[in-house]
Image (cartoon, rainbow, N blue to C red):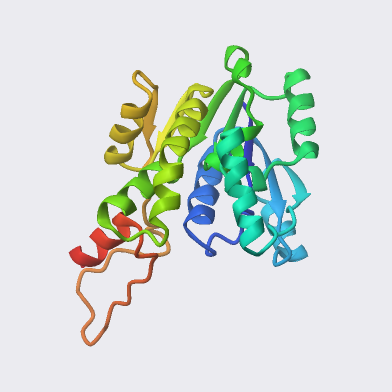
Amino acid sequence: MNVLMISAKFPYPATRGGTEIRTFYCLEALKAEHHVTLLTFREDYVTDAEVEALQAHVDELVVFDAPQNAAPGLAAKLNRLAGFVTTGTPPNIHYYYSDAVQAWVDEAIAQNRFDAITCEHSVNALYIRPEWKEKVRTVINVHSSDYCTKRSNLDLGITDNVWRDRLTLPLLRRYESDTYRKFTTVAVTTADDETQIQEMVAGLHSVIIPNGVDLEEFSFRTTEPAGRQLIFTGTFDYSVNIDTALYL
């Protein structure tokens, strides 16, 4: 198949964070069986060498300049919050929206260039039109649900802005529910995520694609090396990281 992968995050090298890691290895898996076009944004920190290296992992690489940083300050934050309330689109989603990218994707679909589209993370879902489900397979790879994460943080009492999160939580649920309905298939990382998303949209077609470890790079050890310490890093307002740290 001819597959279009849309990723707001530049997924190379696969060491910058969880989003980049999952995206890159999903890309590698798709490339093994299909013709893959990757559409992505280039941040200022991405080098020419990294762009050239990523090109070797896809059949076609389409790169747009990343949007400018959001304006700082309380007034700008309140304006973004008001925009979320009135439009229903979260600020972090709207931040990555580009008319040029939308035009490129619209033209590609009109020309029947692709058999399937995959969106890495929900920030890319804004480019997908609901009616496309009838002509092309659309998949959203939900690395993590912002709604489920925010709800968990509120339940755990670890949010840094309770009133804002309580105000936007139902808006976020509505946005994600409407987003998932646009897609043929929703991919999630865990069974818990699948259950929570199915609660939002009953009857949704979903698949679990778990995160894992590259066993070629991190091979199995027959004995545990002595005198070593394990350092675990992560964002500890995320329940999965908390559970992992407690398990370790």
Name the image quarter holding residue 52: bottom right
Report if residue 24 is visible in the image: yes
- Residue lying furthest top: 134
Image position of 37 (left or right of 223):
right
**The C terminus: image quadrant:** bottom left
Q: Position of residue 3 (x, y in %)?
A: 62, 31
Identify the residue at horizontal 19%, vertical 73% (top origin).
Answer: 223
Identify the residue at horizontal 34%, vertical 20% (top origin).
Answer: 202
Q: Does 5 appear above or below 153?
A: above
Residues 236 and 23: in front is 236
- Residue lying furthest bottom: 227
**The N terminus: image quadrant:** top right
Identify the residue at horizontal 19%, vertical 63% (top origin).
Answer: 247
Q: Position of residue 19 (x, y in %)?
A: 51, 53
Identify the residue at horizontal 32%, vertical 61% (top origin).
Answer: 158
Q: Does 178 appear above or below 164?
A: above
Q: Position of residue 99 (x, y in %)?
A: 78, 37
Report if residue 125 is visible in the image: no
Q: How many badges with numbers are in the image?
A: 0
Image position of 221 (left or right of 189):
left
Name the image quarter holding residue 220: bottom left
Q: Position of residue 88 (x, y in %)?
A: 56, 34
